[in-house]
Structures are given as structure tokens and as C-alpha cells.
Amino acid sequence: MWRDNAMAAALALLLAAVWAWRDWAALAALRLPDTDDVMRLQQIRDWLGGQGFGDLAQHRLGAAGLEMHWSRLPDLVPGAIIALLTPVTGARAAELVAVILWPLLLFAAALMLVAAIARQVRASAPVAVIIAALAYPASALFLPGRIDHHGLQLVLLLILVRAVIGPGGWRSGAAAGAASVASLVVGMETAPFLALGGGVLVLRWVADGAGERLRLLGYGAALVVGLALAALLFRTSGWGVATCDAFAAPLWRAAQVAAVAPLALALVARGIATARARLIAALVVGGASGVAALALSPACLSPYGGVDPLLERLWLGRVAEAQPLFGAPLDHAIGYVGLALAGLAATLWQWRRTRDMGWAVLAAFQLAALALALVQLRGIYAGSLLAAPGLAALIGYARERGALALAAAWVVSAGFLYPALGSLAAPPAPAATCDGGAVLAQLAAQPAGTVAAPIDLGAYALAETRHRVLAAPYHRNAQGNLAVYRLIDLPVDAARAEAKRLRVDLIATCGGAWDELGAPPAGSLRTALRAGTPPDWMTPVAPGASVYRVARRAVAGGKAGGSLPPRCCSRHYRCCGPPCRR
């Protein structure tokens, strides 16, 4: 086992070094790969700068600050790295180390867990590690700079799968329960997988009551105790928000009620002698707890159902990982699900050959990933990693049948080939390019104010400037996002009045900005900006700049161009009204 783990760590380190070297220019500037990564970094900066541990609001985002649907749990390790290194290296170097080291640690852990799962089903662990290391799109979540929660979620899911698929006992049950609780604290994305893991444990208890009782007992106890502790440790400023898109009161209530079911079944297990009786008990107790959970928290039936329909069409529908499989461009669809489909076929083939319960459980998780990808492509991340054991077994089988079969098996198992195949099958249409770095540099040079900019620039503007930003790619920010869309398509004179109402100081544009809105209305502000003829109340901050300062009359209680209270502006913390808080 130690050889497999050493190989996993070495391969993770090698790939991370190659990726960091390739992307060094962006990494050195802390221009992280995804908007969520840079927002995570900003959340950590705010916390280390004095914002409360439970205060997850982004106070410089949206029309009046935004209560984020995130968790503090993914901030702990990168935050600790930054806090420990800052006195020695300075803040910027400490942040650079953190955004490289944290994804590397997660990547190594994920590869070690894949090796453990492969050993459990008697597939080649070293081969599975190599396949998993190149398993697109999951491998992209561990690139240097990917400090958002998705990598952590995958590691927690692999812990759950390893605990469910391995030998019984209270320790494996407790590991499954603890991983499930941590995953719920991080976010809702993996909730279907967590429910599947719990269902598998209950079914294993139904099939083998005495042999599986302790595992079910450890699982149920870890869920109940872990959720109670999590409610104390990770209670946020948005605990009372009515939606079920984060670890807050609605989700906690539903999860805590559902957690009682496996614990109750394990406690009464001694009095249930037959598999049929256990199945009836599981259906009754599980059904009752499910109904009670949804009755207490009906919002959990549709955790993200509150997204504004217009924003869903204009913004969320354009996010690659949020698109449904059959609604995504062909190149994206092939690149995302190609490896997972190959792995699912190999896993089912292995189960048919061996009738081993481990392969059946793996196939169930892979089928769940594919089902989720039918709704949103991001569901396939787990499927691409869990494809590795089945493909490793396929390679072992092909090795006995000659070089040609072995080469074909390795080609099928090479995850990075599927996006290339997708690009060949359906070349992506050229898109207008946005020089975001230039826009951000222009914004950073201006005094703190309120910015109306394209949605995709919002998180970067928060991290690299002191401004308040109206729009950013977060579903709770409907008010700020819609305000920018409305402003940019108003007639020029009406746009000036709207900018004054919103207290906008700067308007930024960019190549391809707001193309999702379609053709600009005649006489609109967007038409004027696209033609390079901004109205006279907008002045470029420098010759040829794509950032414009808005000229507006003085307003009561303040000066034009000064919408932020002068005493309470911080690049790394909050801008708020008096009295200032730290």
C-alpha cells in the first residue's frame, strides 16, 4: 500500500509542477483559473483581515452586500497556510504558496483514495492512479490555483465510496458518516451521492443484518453527532436564509432528521431476524424520515430553484459545467462524459465477470454521476475519477491478449484525449476575447467606488481592487446582476439616471461583454459603447481605456464619484457604513 501512496504523491507533485510552470504568469499575479477560486481567496482574505468566522457575506458585492451560499470549511487549510507563512514571506508569497499547495494536497489524497478503491476490487492500483491523474474533467479541479471547494468535495466523496465498498465495521461506517457531514457542510452539490452512499449501507444491512449492523451503527452515529457539531462550529451569518443551497437551517434540519433513520435501524437491528423484515423496516423508517425532512424543509426539493429565469437564460445557461448533457455543445459533451462512459462500461463488464459487490457499488456511483450530468455536466466529475478502477482492470485483461489490445485499452483510458476528440468532432465557434487583465489594471488605478462591469469580471475585480462590484457570477446576486443588465441596455439618457440611482462610479466594458443579451437596442448605452462613442457623461479613465468614469451631480450626504464611505474601505475586508467594524 505504501508504494501505491508514494506513487500517487509523486505523480501529483510532478503534474502540479508541470501545470504550475505552464501557468506561472497567471499564478504569480494570483489570477486564478476560475472565478470561484479567486472569490475563495477573497473570502479567506476577508476572514484573516478581521471578518467574523461565521460572517460569509461579501460586503463589496451586489447592490447592498451579498450573503454567500458558501462555507468556511474549505477556507481552513489555505487560510492556515497563509496565516502561518505571512509573517515569514509576506502576504502575497504566502497566498501564492497556498493556492499551489492546497490543490496539490487534495490531488495526492484523491489519487491515494482511488488506489485504495482499486485494491478493494482487486484492480491494479498503480494503473488506476495513472488513469485517475489524467482523468478529465476531474483532474482539472486540482490544477494549481483551484482552491475552490470542488476538489475537497471529490476527496470527501472518495472517502465515502472507500468506506462503503470496503469491509464492514463501525470504523468504516463512522468514516462514511463523517465524510458525508463534511461534504454537506461544504455544499449541496454531492447530496445525491451522499444519499446513495447511505442507501448502499442500508441495503448491505438488509442483506446481512448481523454482519453489517456495526457499520450502520457507526454511520448513523457519525451523522447525528457530526451534524450537531457542524451546526455549532459552522453556523453562518446566513443561517436563517430560507433557501436550501448552503449549510444553513433548512438543510441542517432535513439532514438531521434523515440521519436518524440509519441510527434507528442499527439500534433495533437485533430484534429483526430476516432480510424481508429488515427491508420492510428500512422502507418504513427511511420513508418516514424522508417525508419528515422534506416537510420541515420543503426548499430542499429544489435547492437552486430560486435562480431568476432571466439570469438562468443569460448567465447560468452559458456556464459549461452547469449545462445539461444534451443541451451542451457537442465538444463539451464529449470532453466531459467520454471517459466516464468508458469507465462505466468497464465497471459493468467487471461486475458481470466477477459478480463482486464492490464492482456493483462502483457502477451505482458512476450511474448516479451520469444521471446528474443529464441535468448539469458538473455531476460527471465523480464519474471520471471512479472510472479508473474499471479501466485499470480492462488494461490488465488486455495485457494478456497482446500489444494491440493493450494499446487500445490505454487509449480508451486516456481522459485527456476526449476533449481533443470533442474539438475534432465539433470545433468550438470562435468567441470574442476579453482582455480582463487590462480592464482590471485600469480599475485598480482608480479611487474606490462602485463598478458596473460584465458578470465574469466581478470576482476578479473584488480581489484585485478596492471597489464595490454590482455583478458577479453567483446565483444569489440576482439584484446586482439584473441591475447591470438593465443599465447597459437602457437608452443613454435613462442609463445616466439609472447609474445615478445605483451610485455607479465606473462602468467597464470588454470584448464580447454582454453578447449574451443579443443585438443591442438602438440608442442604448451598450450600442454607444460597442460603437466606441460613449455619451458625454462617461469619461475614459485613460486614452483608449475600456473603463469609464461616470460624471454625476453631487448627491445629498456625499460627493459625486464617492459612493463608498471614506473611513471604511479595505481591499481585503469590507466597505460598510458607519460605524466602521473590523
Image: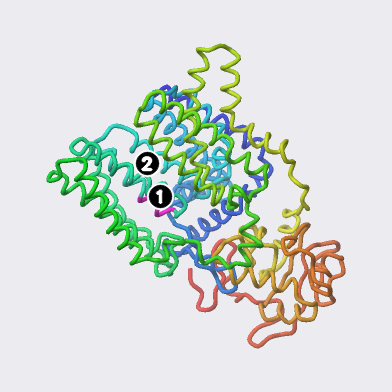
The span from disc 2 to disc 1 (Cα, nearest Å) is 10 Å
Q: Earlier in the sequence, mark 2 or mark 1?
A: 2
Residue 160 is tagged as 2
Chain part drawn in magenta: 181-186
Looking at the rendered structure, the secondary structure element under dot 2 is helix
In the rendered image, which residue does mark 1 sit on? 183
Quarter occupied by residue 406 = top right
In which quadrant of the rendered image does the N terminus lie?
top left
* Percent x, y of residue 197: 36, 44
Q: Amino acid at mark 2?
A: Leu
Q: Quadrant of residue 518?
A: bottom right
42 over 478 or under it: above or below: above
Up/down of 322 relative to 541, above or below: above
Q: Residues within 10 Å of mark 2 (few under 14, many from 20)?
A: many
Secondary structure of the residue carrying numbered label 1: helix
Q: Where 81 falls versus 3 (above or below)?
A: below
- Amino acid of disc 1: Ser
Q: Is residue 434 left or right of residue 32?
A: right
Q: Is residue 423 on the magenta stretch?
A: no
Is residue 11 among what the camera can see?
Answer: yes
Residue at the extreme bottom: 556
Q: Position of residue 228 (x, y in %)?
A: 29, 58
Residue at 71 percent of width and 74 percent of height: 487
